Image (cartoon, helix red, strand yellow):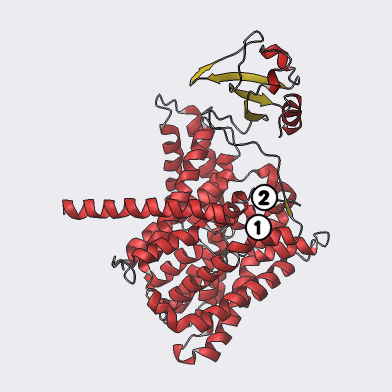
Amino acid sequence: MQLAVESVLLTLSILFFLSILAGKAGYKFGVPALLLFLVVGMAFGSDGLGIDFSNIQVAQTIGSVALCIILFSGGMDTKISDIKPILSQGVILATLGVLLTALFTGVAVWYVFGATMKSAGVGFLTALLLASTMSSTDSASVFSILRSKGLHLKNNLKPMLELESGSNDPMAYVLTITLISLIGMDSEPNYWLAVGNLFLQLIIGGTAGFVGGKLAVFTNNHLRIDNKSLYPILIFTFCIFIFSITYFIKGNGYLAVYIGGLVIGNSQVVHKRSSLNFFDGMAWMSQLLMFLTLGLLINPSELIPIIVPGLIISFIMIFITRPLSVFLCLLPFPKMAIKDKTFISWVGLRGAVPIIFAITVLASGIPQAGLIFNIVFFCTLISLIVQGTSLSLVSKWLGLADKPDKTKDLHDFDVEFSDEIKSVTSEIKVTENALKDGHYLMDLKLPEKTIVVMVKRDGKYFVPNGKTSLAADDMLLVITDDYTALRETYDRLGMPY
């Protein structure tokens, strides 16, 4: 048994390492990292190197915990000040947009299977279930690509897409669970009861998330812990608590953890920066683990019979049902440009979440569950390839991409400042040209809004003053009020910004 555990750990470590290398390559070439994680899992699966993994219950557990962490982290990273101007659009897309996408896609799936695989016996409710699992979008892979290209989006599109992507998963989950229950009923389904349960779960989930987030903030700020590294663990404990307690009070746990993360991320919290970094890493590890699990779970040979309907459904979602849903939802906002709506339509990227929901369907044991799982997997794969690899290109075509004011990551100074401190930090390497007016710090003639807080020389650090003598190749840690002051600093030192 000990040898088996060691073998599993060795295999996992190799898979994680290869996935991280794949993710690094994805950042460089603009390929979604999640797609590469998936490829690594498939390469090691039963149709690849022969790792046989077919435990649906374990996969479902991994998926549920992973999604819980991903949504909580997404909530913590979302700033309410950024989403306020586009709150109405984001909420409509995350609720009505999901419903319309599921409905339109469900009709299309029903028709496609009737035309290509009539023998599969896919009914309308089953088609709606399949569509519901794919009705939400994946934010992590979208913005990992945009960040890898150094792009940001104009017209408040980034916060709008973050809000939609972070908050639309609960709606898709409720639809999925509701349809599983309807299909599993022996008697005539009670649709009104199902709709009532849907809204009840969302209301309870939202309330539980808000209360749980406030409780987490209060506890974190008043519970004095000597070991500072335990503060992120405390927040993680509340993440799991909010998710699980919401389940017992019959609410939607996924909505609860997103709201809880949103409350915590927008509150004054002790050691907030370390908690944000902790959950950013946890979210990526969760996605990595989820896609590795999926890659191991899937047998590529099973995808061959569904290639034709899978391709048709994929392109119907990409080019018809998603754009139709987006344009209908945004009709009340006529001032929004068509190119903005077009890009939002294109960012209907499928990722980890539809796969997790498909595993839930598979674990339910309903008829055609295996077919649903394979179709969802195939459509996710196509979405990652077609939309994921072209997001930055489409944003440029539409004129929505712009180079942001950005400083290079700090390499010589391992320091971080809270988001509440509205300043810009950068490191500057001293050149001979910068010292032409004198070797003292006071001779640099820095702008009033710029201060040098630390110097690194020959591997040693010290705090300077005006009479500190500088030398070429010294590294300076500077803090300015804004990017305008930072650009002026570079100009005065004769350096390119």
For numbered disc 1, what is the local secondary structure?
helix
- Say which residue label 1 marks: 392
Residue identified by numbered label 2: 151
Return the x and y of residue 40 as percentages of the image width and height.
40, 61
Residue type indicated by callout 2: Leu
Residue beneath the point at 48% across and 83% down: 188
Say whether marks 2 and 1 touch (CB < 8 Å).
Answer: yes
- In the displayed structure, would residue 482 be above or below residue 386? above
Badge 1: residue crowd in 10 Å (few <14, some 14–19, many ≥20): many
Residue 287 located left or right of residue 159: left
Q: Earlier in the sequence, mark 2 or mark 1?
A: 2
Residue 77 in the image: above or below residue 497: below
Quarter of the rendering occupied by the C terminus = top right
Visible residue check, residue 209: no
Callout 1, which amino acid? Ser
Quarter of the picture holding the N terminus: bottom left
* Numbered circle sitting on residue 338: none
Nearer to us in this view, 343 or 127 = 343
Q: Position of residue 293 (x, y in %)?
A: 38, 61
Image point (58%, 29%), residue name: 417
Quadrant of res 248: bottom left
In terms of secondary structure, where does tag 2 sit?
Answer: loop
Which residue of the protein is positioned furthest toward the top in this rendering? Answer: 467
Residue 166, horizontal then vertical, whole percent: 58, 54
Q: Residues within 10 Å of mark 2 (few under 14, many from 20)?
A: some
Task: Give the percent coordinates (x, y) of residue 292.
Answer: 39, 60
Residue at point 42%, 26% (across, down): 225
Q: Residue furthest right?
A: 335
In terms of image quadrants, where is residue 350? bottom right
Quadrant for residue 337, please give it: bottom right
**Left or right position of 176 against 437:** left
